[in-house]
Amino acid sequence: MTHHRRQLYELIGEEDAARIESVRGRRGGRLLQQRPRRVRLGACRDVVERLTDLLDGVLTSREQEEVDRHLEGCEGCTRALAQWQQVVALLGRLADDDVGATDRDELLAAYQTGSPGAPD
Amino acid sequence: MPVVPDFGDDRDLVDGLRRRDEAALAWLLDTYDATMRRLAPADVVRDTWLAVLDGVDGFELRTTVRTWVFRTFFQRAGIRVPRAAATAPAFDPKRFRRGSGPTAGRWRKGAGPVAWRDDPARAATELAALPLGERVVVTLRDVDGWTAAEVGDVLDLAEGDQRVLLHQGRARIRQALEDQVA
């Protein structure tokens, strides 16, 4: 490992360093400067773009800490997160009746006629 | 009360389908038909079912039934989810402070998210209007509760691309619901 990379890894912490190493491994080691996107503490504009990552649990522990700290002091982003969850919950309760259904009798007929496994 | 057979176990389901058991077919349709109807025209969905029923005798359970059904479906529907293209911001950039000072990027006064009430009909309309890639991912993940791994597997879509599509789709639906009250 080069001196510079070692220095960089010390700076960004073990977890992000491991992520970079795994990406480098997959792509032939050309990606030193492709650090994971960071959440800039205080920038609501950036925090709201990470809400889906947050709900999916894919933030690094450092990012998670930064976002948690941000949310504690930010009413707007706390509401944005709640609305993200509200959208997910609402979609999960959508009824199926608005989309119509495939005609069962037609399928059943095709399914039961002339099939090798059909009961006699 | 009649006992409604449960075909939640793939082995039972496939055995039932091979016996041409009407209850197994009903279970399969109850479980997956609506999802496909959200994503493709009725005739494509019907053709998918015919192909699935035609193929069930040769299906070897190397994947879950759900994965097999939906791979068949996406192939027949000609749906290929593109890699996430240029990303649109979740909120209008005008809602955040500009400049480079310590408050840059924070919500402008009074520009934060506005409370809205759940409106399933509106959410369904907005879902149906999403660009295809977002509609597919949001339907599988949020309407049907698939895991990220299963969606990535069926669609052959990288996790990062999937999350971008999911995020943008949710953002558009949220914005539409907010626009209704604003």
Image (cartoon, grey):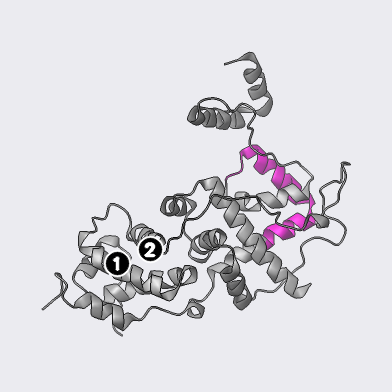
Q: Quadrant of the rendered structure where residue B114 is?
A: bottom right
Q: Which residue is mark 2?
A: B76
**In the image as oriented, which residue stretches furthest toward the top?**
A3
Q: Are marks 1 and 2 in contact (CB under 8 Å)?
A: yes
Tag count? 2
Identified by mark 2, the residue type is Arg
Q: Indicate left or right for B177 with B157 as reference.
A: right
Q: Residue B28 placed where, x, y %?
A: 33, 70
Is residue B138 at all visible to an observer of this figure?
yes
Q: Indicate left or right for B32 with B110 as reference.
A: left
Mark 1 or 2, nearer chain start = 1
Is residue B5 at all visible to an observer of this figure?
no
Q: Residue B84 placed where, x, y %?
A: 58, 50
Judging from the image, mark 2 belongs to the subunit labelled B
Give the dominant element type of the magenta stretch: helix, strand or loop.
helix
Q: Residues within 10 Å of mark 1 (few under 14, many from 20)?
A: some
Q: Which residue is mark 1?
A: B51
Residue at x-position 62% and y-position 39%? A61
**In the image as oriented, which residue stretches furthest toward the left?**
A120
Q: Which sits in the foreground, B5 or A5?
A: A5
Q: Residues within 10 Å of mark 2 (few under 14, many from 20)?
A: some
Q: Which label is found at residue A5?
A: none
Identified by mark 1, the residue type is Ala
Span colored in magenta: A58-83
- SS of the residue under disc 1: helix
- SS of the residue under disc 2: helix
Measure how far apart labels 1 and 2 are at the Cα level: 9 Å
Q: Indicate left or right for A4 with A101 as reference.
A: right
Quarter of the image where the N terminus of chain B is located: bottom left
Residue at x-position 57% and y-position 30%? A20
Q: Residue B32 placed where, x, y %?
A: 40, 69
